[in-house]
Each structure stands twice: as structure tokens, then as C-alpha cells.
Amino acid sequence: MESNVGGRDRIARAVLAVVLSVVAVKALAGGNRSRGALAGVAALGLGVNAVTCFCGLNRALGIDTAE
């Protein structure tokens, strides 16, 4: 896979993944399983994007923020 996520974009995705993870845990602890699952899946996706430096949506749209 060719890297297409970098710099500020990568940091923003990582921070948002952490925030969504907290939202997911709080929602699941509060009994709101649908909100918790949705936030958890979003956090997982953004986390994978940040770690692998690749985003399929960026590729489809022709966006490259890698340095």
C-alpha cells in the first residue's frame, strides 16, 4: 500500500480515534450499545488509518497528505 496520510492529518486521526474510544467506553458503560458500537468502529478505522498511513477514501478521492 502506498502511504497517503501524513503530517497533521495523521495526528488528527490519532487524536480523534482516542476521543471516540473514550466515547465508546462511556456509551457502552451507560448501556447505549448502538452509540458505543458506532463510536468504537469509527475509532478503530481512524486508528488503523493513523498507524498504517493509508486511507482508502483518500485514495478514491485522489487526496494525498503524505509528505
Image: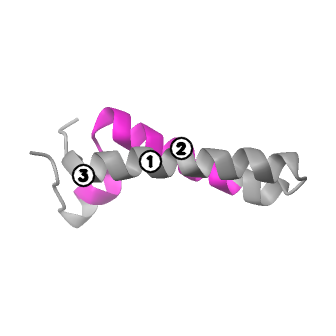
Query: Helix, strand, or loop for circle 2?
Result: helix
Query: Position of 43 compared to 52: left or right?
Result: right
Residue 8, numbered circle = 3
- Quarter residue 61 falls in: bottom left
Based on the picture, tell me whether residue 42 belongs to the magenta stretch.
yes
Write the residue at 64% across / 54% down.
39
Q: How busy is the neighbourhood of tag 3: few (under 14 within 10 Å), some, or many (20 plus)? A: few
Q: Which residue is mark 1?
A: 15
Write the residue at 79% across / 53% down.
27
Pointer 2 with pointer 1, Cβ within 8 A: yes
- Quarter residue 53 falls in: top left
Amino acid type of disc 1?
A: Val
Q: How busy is the neighbourhood of tag 1: few (under 14 within 10 Å), some, or many (20 plus)? A: some
Amino acid type of disc 3?
A: Arg
Q: Relative to residue 60, is residue 51 depicted above or below? A: above
Query: Position of 15 compared to 33: left or right?
Result: left
Percent position of residue 42, x then y: 56, 52
